[in-house]
């Protein structure tokens, strides 16, 4: 079907379901069918999920995040995740994970359209968390349904931008030049509106009544629908560069009135909600949303809070740390102390923004960050959980097997692009990163990862040499201790 021939609500819904987002469509329909089947057990849900390796990996990562796992016991199986989370939370995670994967898989998308899509996705993520926060006194099922309703409120528009191509670029250009008549422009080009596409998809997917009502009858004044509407309005306002502090304050006061709390209390909750949204986006592998989520949090940070400056390469720190590592090796020091010293040397001495030491589990089926440091305080231990069984071969597999230290200069690096599947790109820095194996007795037991994702500063040959030197010294220390 040619892009230009797609007109009208029904045509766009069919195109999205069949061509653009069949995986998300299938997942949502499966979950909704299970929700309505009294004979369906949690075990059946777990078995259905196991058929999708990527989804399994994402669920385990989210289940182990601080948002869901309040204890210290790691969740390593889907069956355990099902018991821990319950159906509604698992449904929320599945839909969110599939949404992120489906929307970000397109390669035929211009930079301007991509930025519009990321802003809209960040808005949806934030709105979902705000709606859940506003219904804090309601039962968990209602809160989870409100989360999904807010998350998918703009699904029609998000899907359109994610498909890329000439029509998205033409509409983007017209909307940038528009003077307040956006809906008319969209209707003229698509033969429908984004809201109608979203409502049609919600009906086609047999979604819950809360999402359908929020799209078809947004003026109905139930507390749940009001929370969804205000969460979407507020998150959109925070993403609007033209929004004034007065407009933000006015919307905040309206939300506080809805929740029957003082504005100052709401302000604290909104800030906390923003921080949790950023952590959750990282956990889902949506690292690219962080600049837009950071912007939505900015109005709630105290004026005196300063942004941490990136670490500049420091030869003295490098030399001092390398000497300390040598001393620790002869003292038969604790391995954890050696790893912490190495991490410090690369992070502070080489001047990196993010450093993670990834260790293999006993079965050698997973890499997970055991030691980490990040300039932007991002939860690297939740981000770097890499499944090695199933799925596509990646640069992580390559380094573990070949013992090779590599410098990936960008996600489009011709030499390495075939080892950079979407899951690897989602957690690594698009502008380049270093990766090196931790080798003991000729066996890889883990990897060092380092990048400058936060500051965007370029990596240099000198940086790569210093990084390699630290890894080699660490390997020598570990060998000396073990022998």
Image (tube, rainbow, N blue to C red):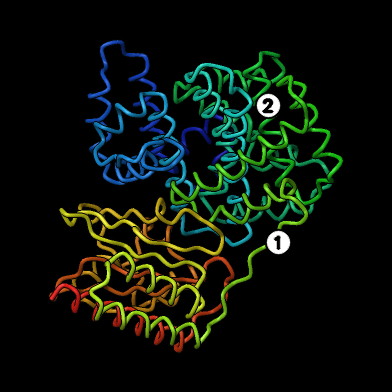
Q: Is residue 201 above or below residue 317?
A: above
Given residues 357 and 55, the one toward you in this image is 357
Residue occupying image coordinates x 29% and y 39%: 75
The residue nearer to you, when weighing 409 against 265, is: 265
Bin the neighbour count of mark 1 within 10 Å (Cα to Cα): few under 14, some 14-19, many 20 and up: few
| CB within 8 Å, label 1 to label 2 | no
Name the disc covering residue 306, or none. Answer: 1
Q: State the image coordinates of residue 101 (x, y, percent, origin top left).
A: 42, 47
Image quarter (top left, top right, bottom left or bottom right) of the C terminus: bottom left
**Which residue is at a point 77% across and 33% down the rendered structure image?**
264
* Mark 2 crowdedness (10 Å alpha carbons): few <14, some 14-19, many ≥20: many
Q: Earlier in the sequence, mark 1 or mark 2?
A: 2
Q: Residue at point 34% right, 60% down?
A: 421
Q: Position of residue 365 (x, y in %)?
A: 20, 54
Left or right of 137 in this view: 390: left
Element marked by disc 1: loop
Question: Can you give x and y, in whole percent of width and height, for residue 313 in the image?
Answer: 53, 82
Q: Residue at x 36, y 32 (%)?
A: 26
Q: Position of residue 59 (x, y in %)?
A: 35, 40
Identity of the residue furthest to the top in this view: 38
Residue 229's disc number: 2
Residue 311, above or below 224: below
Lateral position of residue 193 relative to residue 412, left or right: right
For residue 29, above or below residue 408 = above
């Amino acid at each position: 079907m040619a892009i230009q021939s797609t007109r009208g609500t029904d045509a766009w819904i069919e195109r999205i379901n069949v061509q653009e987002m069949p995986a998300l469509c299938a997942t949502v329909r499966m979950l909704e069918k299970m929700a309505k089947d009294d004979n369906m057990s949690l075990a059946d849900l777990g078995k259905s999920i196991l058929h999708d390796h990527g989804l399994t990996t994402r669920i385990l990562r989210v289940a182990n995040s601080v948002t869901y796992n309040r204890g210290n016991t790691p969740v390593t199986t889907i069956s355990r995740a099902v018991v821990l989370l319950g159906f509604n939370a698992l449904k929320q995670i599945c839909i969110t994970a599939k949404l992120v994967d489906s929307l970000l898989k397109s390669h035929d998308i211009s930079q301007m359209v991509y930025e519009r899509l990321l802003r809209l996705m960040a808005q949806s993520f934030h709105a979902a968390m705000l709606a859940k926060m506003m219904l804090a006194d309601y039962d968990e099922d209602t809160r989870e349904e409100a989360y999904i309703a807010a998350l998918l409120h703009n699904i029609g528009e998000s899907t359109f931008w994610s498909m890329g191509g000439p029509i998205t670029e033409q509409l983007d250009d017209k909307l940038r030049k528009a003077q307040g008549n956006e809906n008319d422009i969209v209707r003229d080009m698509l033969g429908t509106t984004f809201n109608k596409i979203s409502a049609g998809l919600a009906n086609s997917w047999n979604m819950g009544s809360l999402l359908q009502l929020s799209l078809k009858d947004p003026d109905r004044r139930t507390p749940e629908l009001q929370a969804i509407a205000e969460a979407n309005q507020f998150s959109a306002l925070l993403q609007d560069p033209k929004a004034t502090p007065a407009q933000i304050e006015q919307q905040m006061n309206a939300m506080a009135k809805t929740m029957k709390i003082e504005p100052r209390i709401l302000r604290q909750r909104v800030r906390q909600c923003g921080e949790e949204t950023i952590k959750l986006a990282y956990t889902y592998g949506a690292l690219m949303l962080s600049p837009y989520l950071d912007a939505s949090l900015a109005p709630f940070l105290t004026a005196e809070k300063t942004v941490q400056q990136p670490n500049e390469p420091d030869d003295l720190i490098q030399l001092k740390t390398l000497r300390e590592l040598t001393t620790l090796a002869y003292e038969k020091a604790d391995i954890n102390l050696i790893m912490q010293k190495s991490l410090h040397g690369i992070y502070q001495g080489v001047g990196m923004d993010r450093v993670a030491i990834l260790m293999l589990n006993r079965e050698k089926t997973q890499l997970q960050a055991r030691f980490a440091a990040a300039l932007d305080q991002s939860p690297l231990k939740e981000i770097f959980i890499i499944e090695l069984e199933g799925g596509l071969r990646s640069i992580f597999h390559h380094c573990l097997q070949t013992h090779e230290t590599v410098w990936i200069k960008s996600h489009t690096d011709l030499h390495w692009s075939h080892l950079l599947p979407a899951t690897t790109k989602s957690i690594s820095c698009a502008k380049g990163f270093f990766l090196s194996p931790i080798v003991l007795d000729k066996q890889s037991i883990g990897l060092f990862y380092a990048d400058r994702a936060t500051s965007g500063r370029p990596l240099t040959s000198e940086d790569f040499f210093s990084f390699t030197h630290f890894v080699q010294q660490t390997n020598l220390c570990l060998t000396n201790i073990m022998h």
